[in-house]
Amino acid sequence: MTNKINSTIKNVPFIRNDQYNFIQFQIKNLVHAHLTTQDQGVLNALKLSSLDKIYTLLPNINESQKALLNKVVSIEKDYQAESFLSELKYYVTPFKNITEKTITKLFPKAKKLKGPPLEEIDFKEISYLGWYDIRSERKFLIVDYNGKLKGIQGSFQENNKGICSLCNHHEDIGLFMSKVKAGKETYTNRGNYICSDSHRCNQNLILLDGLNKFVELLRK
Ligand SMILES: [Zn+2]
C-alpha cells in the first residue's frame, strides 16, 4: 500500500516540453563527448556541469525527482540516452488541453477557421500550438502566457533559412506580422521571424524566453 502511494507521488509530471528538450540537449552533448574523448577528467567535469545546469533549470525538485535526474551522469551511449529519455517523457506535463471549441473561442473573428489535426498532436511535445491556415493565408499560434491561453494570428511570409526568434535555431523561417492596437483607433504592424514548421520549432525550444518576448511584442 505504502509503495503504491509512493510510486504515485513519484510519477507526477514535473517538467515542461522546453525543459525536457533542455535535458535532452545536455544528454546529447554527453553522448557526443563520450564518442570524442577518453579523458576521464574531461568527461567527469562535463557530467557534473550538465547535472548542475539541469538542477539550476529545476530548482524546486524533490529527492525522488533528483534521483531520477541523477541518472544523467551514467549516460554514455545512445541507447542509454534513448532509454532514459523515454522514461523522462513520462514526467512531462502536457500543454493545456485544446479543443475545436478552444480555437473558436481564441479566434472569434476568424470565420470557418480550420485548426490543426488535434488528435495527432502529442501535447507533451509542445510549448505552443502553431499552424498555417491556407484559406486565410495566416499563421495561428496558441500560447500559454502567464498561465492563460492566448491566441495570436498574423500574416506569414515564407522567407529562407534564418534564426527563429522563438527557438533561436537556424531553420526555414518566415516573417510573422500581426496588427497590434497602438492607440484608441490606430494600429501598428509588429512581428518577427519564426519557424515555418511549428512542430520542429517546439522540438528546438529549450527556453521559453523567446516565446514570451514574442507574445509581449504582440500584446495589445
Ligand atoms: Zn523556431
Image (cartoon, rainbow, N blue to C red):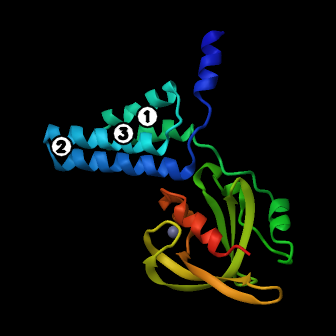
Residue occupied by mark 2: 42
Q: Which is in the foreground here, disc 1 or disc 3?
A: 3
Query: Is residue 46 shown above or below 207?
Result: above
Earlier residue among tags 2 and 1: 2
Disc 3 marks a residue whose amino acid type is Leu
Residue occupied by mark 1: 69
Displayed quadrant of residue 187: bottom right
Residue occupied by mark 3: 51
Q: Which mark is residue 16?
A: none
Location of the N terminus (image quadrant): top right
Question: Is residue 22 in sight in this rendering?
Answer: yes
SS for dot 3: helix
Disc 2 marks a residue whose amino acid type is Val
> Of 122 and 53, which appears nearest the observer?
53
* Residue 74 placement (x, y as % from top left): 31, 33
* Residue 156 placement (x, y as % from top left): 63, 83
Location of the C terminus (image quadrant): bottom right
* Residue 71 placement (x, y as % from top left): 38, 32
Q: Distance between the residues labelled 2 and 3?
A: 14 Å
Q: Residues within 10 Å of mark 2 (few under 14, many from 20)?
A: few
Displayed quadrant of residue 134: bottom right
Earlier residue among tags 2 and 3: 2
Is there a contact, CB below 8 Å, between mark 1 and mark 3? Answer: yes
Q: Residues within 10 Å of mark 3 (few under 14, many from 20)?
A: many
Q: Is residue 48 left or right of residue 123?
A: left
Disc 1 marks a residue whose amino acid type is Leu
Q: Is residue 22 left or right of residue 120?
A: left
SS for dot 1: helix
Earlier residue among tags 1 and 3: 3
Query: Is residue 213 shown above or below 59?
Result: below
